Image: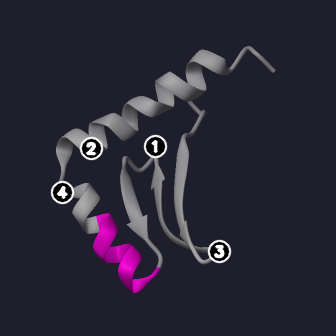
Amino acid sequence: LKDIQYVYSEFYNKLEIARFDSSLGKYVGYTEYGVKQANYWNSDPSYIARMKAQRETVCLNNVGID
């Protein structure tokens, strides 16, 4: 269960602008706008804590279903 990873991507116009990765524990931006958004999201500890909790909520609770 330790190698399960939660990844959440933000897209605009079919282009990935930013991605949250539970193994990194932060957002990473891939465009100029995405970098700005990632910095904004990463600066909010409560938002990052909520995204980290999604790994347990979404992934770990549903790993045995499939």
Whether label 2 touches label 3, CB < 8 Å: no
Instruction: Name the quadrant containing residue 1.
Output: top right
Where the C terminus falls, by quadrant? top right
Which residue is painted at 39% across and 29% down in the image? 53
User: Could you tell whether 6 is left or right of 48 in the image?
Assistant: right
- Tell me which numbered mark, 4 or 1, is placed earlier along the sequence: 1
Q: CA distance from mark 3 to mark 1?
A: 23 Å
Which residue is label 2 attached to?
47
| Position in image of residue 39 (x %, y %) | 26, 67
Q: Is residue 55 above or below residue 15?
A: above
Q: Which residues are magenta?
A: 31-38
Q: Nearer the viewer, mark 2 or mark 3?
A: 3
| Position in image of residue 46 (x %, y %) | 21, 39
Q: Is residue 65 above or below residue 43?
A: above
Q: Which structural element holds mark 3?
A: loop
- Tell me which numbered mark, 4 or 3, is placed earlier along the sequence: 3
Q: CA distance from mark 2 to mark 3?
A: 25 Å
Q: Nearer the viewer, mark 4 or mark 3?
A: 3
Q: CA distance from mark 1 to mark 2?
A: 13 Å
Which residue is label 4 attached to?
43
How crowded pointer 1 is (Cα within 10 Å; few <14, some 14-19, many 20+) is rated as some
User: Could you tell whether 36 is left or right of 11 in the image?
Assistant: left
